[in-house]
Image (spheres, helix red, strand yellow):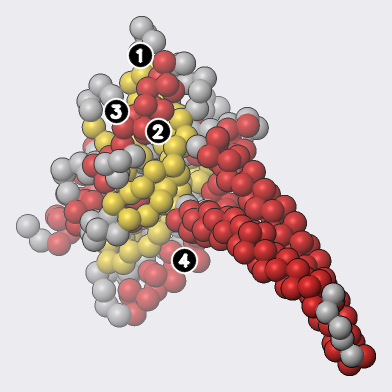
């Protein structure tokens, strides 16, 4: 089979396959042939011979990109070239990303036959965030705020009927899997990476979500163990997007956020909370007790006969000691208030978990 026969075979593949797209363009951008998925669908009033052009099938701004790649391949005597194009979806007029390889099929390097395919992210990205939450709801706004504040690790989907997981590339890479491992036929379960101590509580919250038919949203903080044995803190949101006719959940979609930095801050606050408690105790019970002892000794010394210089020094020591006691009282009060504020924040965070 020569090169032209091989190209014609590819062309036939594009026409009959549901996975590939096919188009043949002349030098002016007129469509010589294409599969039914390209270009507007003619209506009853359209002339049968009405020609289609590049701009009927792809974003007009992509023409320069296509021409640039075509001329570059021609000048370098290459038989084909690749280019990313935005395909127009008719009749909505939306754009979809596609990747193409074009082959020269005429000696003047003007007419090109291309085979393309849609460029889509692995599931569940195809579902889109719009299917996951309502941005006007309380839960939706919370997810948006969390995404803005934390690092979005990726998405997951669990099919309860097939007991199968689907995870996004980003989530898989975070767990430590290579591109080849993610591309393999064997599905990767992110659930086995959940910390053993956190897994039962996560399941408990997920069951509550199911029992209330989704009225109680699924939201849980938990730890994830990566393949390299590193542990990160994550915040998981979930939503049942499919239910059976009998009211049982069949498919759950979720996203996972990295909250490790926030957790580090919470740990620091807790440690600071305990430090302030110990400091307040030390100040009130130890330092002020010593100050009281000094003032008591000064009272005893005051009752003894003193010369003018001794009286002056004793008065100076008493005044400085009383100033020290006032400073300690103020410091203790501030420590207690700060500690109460931290304690209130920590309790509030624990109640929301």
Can you see residue 190?
no
Mark 2 secondary-structure assignment: strand
Mark 1 / mark 4, whichever is N-terminal: 4
Extreme residue toward the right, this view: 308
Q: Which mark is residue 46?
A: none
Determine whether 212 is above or below 330 in the image: above
Q: How far apart are marks 4 and 2 (CA)?
A: 37 Å
Residue 285 as seen in the image, left or right of residue 108: right
Q: Distance between the residues labelled 4 and 3?
A: 41 Å
Determine whether 203 is above or below 230 in the image: above
Q: Which mark is residue 65?
A: 4
Mark 1 secondary-structure assignment: loop
List the residue tagged with mark 3. Answer: 159
Mark 1 neighbour class, 10 Å CA radius: few under 14, some 14 to 19, many 20 or more: some
Going 58% across and 41% down the picture, which residue do you hit? 347
Residue 309 as seen in the image, left or right of residue 202: right
Mark 4 secondary-structure assignment: helix
Extreme residue toward the bottom, this view: 309
Q: Quadrant of the N terminus?
A: bottom left
Q: Distance between the residues labelled 1 and 4?
A: 50 Å
User: Residue 29's spot in the image, x, y percent?
Assistant: 45, 57
Going 25% across and 21% down the picture, which residue do you hit? 161
Q: Residue 248 carries which label?
A: 1
Q: How far apart are marks 3 and 1 (CA)?
A: 12 Å
Going 44% across and 33% down the picture, which residue do you hit? 238
Kindly indicate whether the residue at mark 1 contacts the one at mark 3 (C-beta within 8 angstroms): no
């Amino acid at each position: 089979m020569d090169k032209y026969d091989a190209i014609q075979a590819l062309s036939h593949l594009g026409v009959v396959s549901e996975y590939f797209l096919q188009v043949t363009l002349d030098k002016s951008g007129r469509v010589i042939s294409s599969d039914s998925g390209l270009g507007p669908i003619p209506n009853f009033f359209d002339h049968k011979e009405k020609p289609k052009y590049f701009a009927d099938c792809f974003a007009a701004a992509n023409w320069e990109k296509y021409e640039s790649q075509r001329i570059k391949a021609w000048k370098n005597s290459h038989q084909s070239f690749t280019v990313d194009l935005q395909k127009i979806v008719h009749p909505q007029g939306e754009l979809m990303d596609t990747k193409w390889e074009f082959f020269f099929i005429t000696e003047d390097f003007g007419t090109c036959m291309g085979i393309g395919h849609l460029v889509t992210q692995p599931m569940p990205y195809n579902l889109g965030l719009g299917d996951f939450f309502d941005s006007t709801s309380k839960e939706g706004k919370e997810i948006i705020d969390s995404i803005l504040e934390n690092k979005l690790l990726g998405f997951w989907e669990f099919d309860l009927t097939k007991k199968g997981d689907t995870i996004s590339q980003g989530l898989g890479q975070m767990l430590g899997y290579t591109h080849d491992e993610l591309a393999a036929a064997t599905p990767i379960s992110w659930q086995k990476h959940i910390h053993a101590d956190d897994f039962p509580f996560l399941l408990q919250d997920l069951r509550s979500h199911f029992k209330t038919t989704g009225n109680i949203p699924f939201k849980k903080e938990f730890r994830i163990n990566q393949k390299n044995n590193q542990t990160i803190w994550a915040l998981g949101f979930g939503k049942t997007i499919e239910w059976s006719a009998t009211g049982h959940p069949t498919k759950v979609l979720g996203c996972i956020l990295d909250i490790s930095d926030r957790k580090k801050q919470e740990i620091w606050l807790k440690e600071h909370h305990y430090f302030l408690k110990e400091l307040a105790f030390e100040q009130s019970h130890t330092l002020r007790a010593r100050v009281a002892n000094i003032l008591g000794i000064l009272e005893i010394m005051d009752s003894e006969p003193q010369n003018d210089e001794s009286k002056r020094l004793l008065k100076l020591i008493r005044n400085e000691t009383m100033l020290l006691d006032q400073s300690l009282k103020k410091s203790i009060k501030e420590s207690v208030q700060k500690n109460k504020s931290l304690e209130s924040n920590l309790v509030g965070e624990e109640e929301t978990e």
